[in-house]
Image (spheres, rainbow, N blue to C red):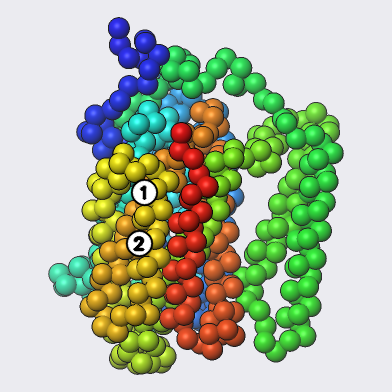
Amino acid sequence: MSSILAGIKPRLSLAQIINMSVGFFGIQFAFGLQNANVSRIFQTLGASIDDIPILWIAAPLTGLIVQPIIGHWSDKTWHKRWGRRRPFFMVGAIFASLALFIFPNVSEIWMAAIMLWLLDASINVSMEPFRAFVGDMLPDSQRTTGFAMQSFFIGTGAVISSLLPYLLTEFGVANEAPEGILPDSIKISFIIGAVVYIAAISYTVFTTKEYSPEEMKSFGEIGDSDNTVHIKTEASSFTKKGSIWAFIGLALTAGLFLYNSSSTDKLEKELYVLTGGIAAFGICQLVAGLMHKNKSTNGFVEVMDDLNFLPDTMKKLAIVQFFSWFALFAMWIYTTPALAQHIAGTTDASSVAYNKMGNWVGVLFAFYNGFAALFAFLLPVLAKRFSRPATHMIALIAGGLGLISFYIFKNENLLIISMAGVGLAWCSILAMPYSMLTRALPAQKMGVYMGIFNFFIVIPQILAATLLGVFTRHIFNGNAIMTIVVGGCSMILAAFLTLRIKDK
């Protein structure tokens, strides 16, 4: 009798795990191109350096909105030929590839902002179901390997896409262009990215077959009653919670506006996104309460209800994710100015020394992604030996020490050692929390909870973009290297918070 008929989810071969993970190479290839070049695109089209953060806020906001929606829809989807998650892989890939073709050819900032929204929304449509895909397809004993394989393809895709414009330039492609026009090295990189994205996603779609609802029932992961909608939050509870959060958000927004209107030392305008987000959450709860009171049960009410009843393991992992990603954003935002000031002794962004250090930071980032790809093969071994929470704790401590060592090392070449620690942490952050989380989630809500889990990546990103600027200017007197140290301490705090998680 086959393992499926016996009611046991089969273990997949290494080749099958690779097939189902290749699509993430395309996703990260697109993300790598976006992260490395979008600021350059905005500035080429005339955006000032002060406008860049608010333009970039599209990326986290898009994920915040899109991922829970796509997760909910993919949980409810089943097509006999295309399955549950794969239709979303493909739709996202088609639109993301179109965006990659168009993006480097836009001529106005507003057009670039729209294309960034479209690109990031499309990437999120593909990416969100991929996390649930591992939970669907693999038994718990193989999920660490599955997410580690995704980490490998993420690291590989990030390294290649980040270096692509440089490599094209080395092969003679023009890296300069008239004012207001992007060079051919960027345009061709995005075209290659579009082809790689659709090809990688297509490979996974056509080589991997998903389990049907009947097979999932045979594994005991879903039951006949799981499609029945049960809203656990009372309408009055929606209304009460919504009123509190809406009041807090609106009050903070009003206070921020009044302060910035009367003060010469204005707070970052990105804070409006955070305060407005709090108010929006409250308003969404109020709307859900009104719908529920009128007996209108739909996907929106379901998602709002799911937000109110997060599994215990997810709550604990959310705090770990918050401090982990806060540290990562500190590194991504401040590494160049911190090292230029700390090692090269300059804060002049137009100086040769500053730009030389900026180029070296690009190399260091390629190193940590490369280390992450290599360490992906180590994670399953460590998890089997020590447990998943212990493995994640070890990796986060290594990453935290790596960031703190930025302050200690005065030779830029020694920072490659720092990046080894960061690479191990990055690899684990992309794999271990999801491996632990999938065990705690009901199979019929794997997608929506994975989308909600993304909140704890987005929120620290918004906070990092705002609060760290305040810390750097007012607490550290402009000494950005101390901001990196704060990031390292945040990651070590996240490491010890993993001790609260019990991996049964």
Residue drawn at (31%, 75%) of the image: 361
- Structural distance between the alpha carbons of marks 1 and 2: 11 Å
Residue shown at 53% from the left, 81% from the top: 472
Along the line of sight, the residue nearer the viewer: 53 or 131 = 131
Q: Is residue 197 above or below residue 400?
A: above
Residue with the mark numbered 2? 398
Residue 391 badge: 1
Q: Is residue 238 above or below residue 81?
A: below
Relative vertical location of residue 27 with respect to residue 448 in this rendering, above or below:
below
Within 10 Å of the Cα at label 2, are there few (<14), some (14-19), or many (20+) other Cα atoms? many
Q: Residue furthest top?
A: 1
User: Picture coordinates of residue 109 (x, y %)?
Assistant: 51, 71
- Give x and y (percent) for residue 13: 24, 29
Front-most of residues 303 and 89: 303
Helix, strand, or loop for circle 1? Answer: helix
Q: Sequence order check: which comes first, mark 1 or mark 2?
A: 1
Q: Nearer the viewer, residue 494 or 58?
A: 494
Which quarter of the image is occupied by the N terminus?
top left
Q: How many marks?
A: 2
Kindly identify the amino acid type of the residue bearing the numbered disc 2: Ala
Residue 343 screen position, x and y as percent: 33, 87
Residue at position x 27%, y 42% in the image: 381
Q: Secondary structure at mark 2?
A: helix
